[in-house]
Image: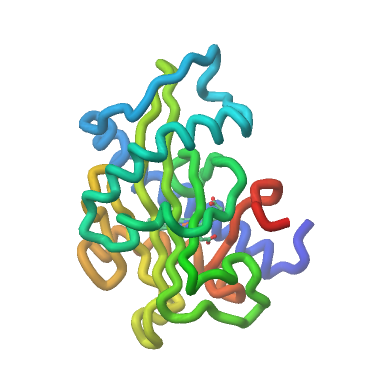
Amino acid sequence: MFASARSFQNYLAIIVTALISSLFLFPAYAQQDDDVKPIGHIELSNPADLTKQQAEQIYLSVLPEIKAIFAMSDIGAATKYTSWKRYNNAPYISATHGARYVDNYANEIAKDYGKLKRGETYPKGSILAKDSFSVTSDQSIFPGALFLMEKMGKGFNKPSGDWKYTMVLPDGSVFGTTNGENSDIVEFCIGCHAAKATLDHIFYVPKGYSKDP
Ligand code: HEC
């Protein structure tokens, strides 16, 4: 299963960081959910267990609301990422991003998202955006955080591969951003993504969910 001891090590690093970071993420989310209003309701017998088609339908139906929420943000990418190319064919649950359904977008500069060869890097100005939502057992749909990675100039932040990580809360406010507001609370992003250092810290969407075959 693992090509080398190194990739096994990377795998372990991801799991450990996921466990640690969930300690960070879940309290923040739990607290936040009290004030976050649902953006839709659905009629399903088991909303926790959506099919790919159901997840896609729900996402498309609440996308205008998600868009309106992030349009309130001061972060430029948050206000326009939904006009960029989307790279996944249906929302999938991301255990590493708060166990929400997520979707991936990349701007024009990052058009080689997922196609990079080992050792190559994305151009400065590349931005990747991942929005998220959850579906609760009482059939409500809640908006989740927006996760951003922006490629900065050389020397911005060596451990992060010069990526600026930003987490935007579902009211448009910034939870943390590398080398900026609350930089320390988004440091765990860097640690986990560094497992993919040979691919410029990028994981890409899971198998079976990529729009590009
Ligand atoms: C424990 C590991 C882990 C942590 C922590 C983590 N990520 Fe990720 N990230 C991943 C994985 C795995 C993927 C691809 C699969 C997925 O979406 O779940 C990904 C994908 C992404 C993507 C799409 C680009 C890509 O790599 O394909 C963005 C943007 C992103 N993460 C931002 C963030 C931000 C911002 C944070 C911190 C607030 C963060 N991530 C924390 C593991 C992590």
Q: The N terminus lies in which quarter of the figure? A: bottom right
Quarter assignment of residue 163 = bottom left
Q: From what the image shows, is residue 175 above or below residue 117?
A: above
Q: Identify which residue, 104 or 20, lies in the foreground.
A: 104
x, y (%) of residue 89?
61, 46
Quarter assignment of residue 64 = top left
Q: From what the image shows, is residue 140 above or below residue 181?
A: above
Judge from the rendering whether residue 171 lies leftward or rightward of residue 196; answer left or right. Answer: left
- Residue at image location 22% in from the left, 61% down from the top: 182
x, y (%) of residue 7?
68, 66
x, y (%) of residue 119?
62, 82
Which residue sits furthest top?
Answer: 45
Q: Identify which residue, 33 or 58, lies in the foreground.
A: 58
Q: The C terminus lies in which quarter of the figure? A: bottom right
- Residue at image location 54% in from the left, 74% down from the top: 200
Q: Identify which residue, 154 or 79, lies in the foreground.
A: 79
Q: From what the image shows, is residue 147 above or below residue 45?
A: below
x, y (%) of residue 13?
55, 60
